[in-house]
Image (spheres, helix red, strand yellow):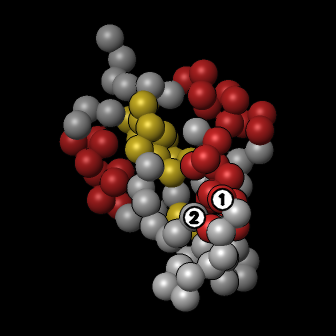
Amino acid sequence: MRAPWIGITMSVSVEATPERSHLNATYVRAVQQGGGVPVLLPPHLGEEALAALWERIDGLLLTGGGDVDPARFGQERHPTVYDVAPLRDDLELTV
């Protein structure tokens, strides 16, 4: 029996140039300590790549981070909303 492949969503730095995907190493270590194989899921993946990954991964870890853009739900942005990353929202809402 093979170890389960666990997809881990990554954050994106929207203010950085060039734009960067990043992840706290704690998530990778935790998946490995649990016997899984971490598969990093940057928000920049295209539809074809994502479809191929969904065929192969056995689980998914949503890592959290910034806020989902309230506009996606027809709401106005509150002053406390932070780190909105449309690419990450797209990935995590898709999965």
Q: Position of residue 75 (x, y in %)?
A: 65, 69
Foreground label between 2 and 1? 1
Residue under numbered circle 1: 73
Identify the residue at image location x=44%, y=49%.
62
- Nearer to me, 47 or 22: 47
Question: How far from the left and from the top, in percent, is residue 25?
Answer: 35, 61
Q: Residue furthest left?
A: 33
Q: Identify the residue shown where x is 72% and y is 82%.
A: 17
Locate the C terminus and report the quarter of the image it occupies. top right
Q: Is residue 68 above or below residue 35?
A: below
Q: Which mark is residue 68?
A: 2
- Crowd class of label 2 (few under 14; some 14 to 19; many from 20; radius 10 Å): many
User: Where is the N terminus found, in terms of image quarters?
Assistant: top left
**Between discs 2 and 1, the one toward the N terminus:** 2
- Residue 8 placed where, x, y %? 46, 47
Residue type, mark 1 in image: Phe
Q: Which mark is residue 44?
A: none
- Looking at the picture, does residue 59 appear above or below residue 30? above
* Helix, strand or loop at mark 2: loop
**Of the pair 34 and 59, the residue shown nearer to us:** 59
Proximity of marks 2 and 1: CB atoms separated by less than 8 Å: yes
Amino acid under disc 2: Val
- Residue 64: give x, y in percent of width and height: 43, 60
Residue 13: quadrant of the picture: bottom right
Location of residue 86 with respect to 56 vertically, above or below: below
